[in-house]
Image (tube, rainbow, N blue to C red):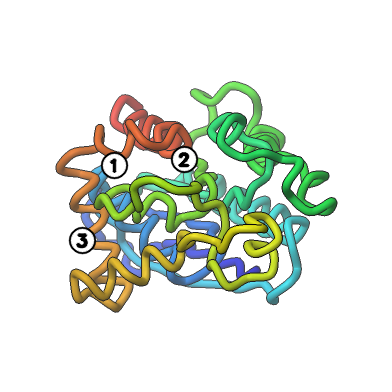
Amino acid sequence: MHLRLLGCLPANPQLPSDMALLYLVTESERDAVFYRKCAEHLAERTISWSSALRNRKGDGSDAVKKQMGYALQSAKAAAGGEEEVCFIAAIDNDRTPHPENEKSLPRDKLSDLERTRPSRLKWVETTATNMLGENRSAWGLLVALAVPVEMIESWTVKAIGGEQSGGPEPHFSRRNQDKSRKYYHPIEPPPQWKDLERGLRDQIEKWDDESFYGHVVSAIASDPEHLRGKSTSFVHFHDQLLGWSSC
């Protein structure tokens, strides 16, 4: 797992007062592009400047918690300045227990390891409240927590109608993974979320992340109900972004 922390810092004290500082904790640089665009276009924030830190691959959820706490501390400290401070933490659900997959994901077909993994949504929310307190209105910064079911590609594919009709539902990254083959046995795995997204990038000829995620987020912004009707994990994230406008 790659963790990416983007902390937007005031590069110039003369920046306009409507500029926002954005702190992002994500699993990769690619994910960071998507969530920054969500802040800009779904929450209508103008972001000032970004810097980055990265965890080592394979450090796991404990490292994510550690970096999320560090990012929250930095964001809270910055919240005393003139600029608005925003914070997004995002990690893929990857088949851990979540209200969205309660009925669609038979857990008895998962590996022993995956069946015992705790809810990522719960620990992301717990980490935030442990750092900032139970009273969200007193946090002093705008926070949105994202746990896509089962991964960010689930949202991007559903947002622009790239799902396949009929057949088993995808739950994994790629169809050629051993875990995919074992889960769908004895049938061949259907295309999984990263497979489907790759096909969409080819179809619309937007291979780089800036243009592809720009296309996806624009589609969401123009008709958010399209994705909201397909993913309750997106509803959870989107509602938080919408709440920024009332703060």
Q: Is residue 149 left or right of residue 57?
A: left
Q: Residue at x 28, y 71 (%)?
A: 201
Q: Horizontal and vertical percent for residue 139?
A: 54, 32
Depth check, mark 3 against mark 1: the one in front is 3
Q: Nearer the viewer, residue 179 or 114?
A: 179
Q: Horizontal and vertical percent for residue 90?
A: 53, 51
Q: Which residue is mark 3?
A: 215
* Circle nearer the N terminus (2, 3): 2
Residue lying at the far left of the rendered structure: 222
Q: Which residue is mark 1?
A: 43
Q: Residue at x 36, y 36 (%)?
A: 230
Say the numbered circle drawn on residue 144.
Answer: 2
Q: Nearer the viewer, residue 124 or 216?
A: 216
Q: Identify which amino acid the numbered label 1 is placed on.
A: Ala
**How far is mark 3 from mark 1, CA to CA?**
16 Å
* Circle nearer the N terminus (3, 1): 1
Quarter in which the N terminus is drawn: bottom right
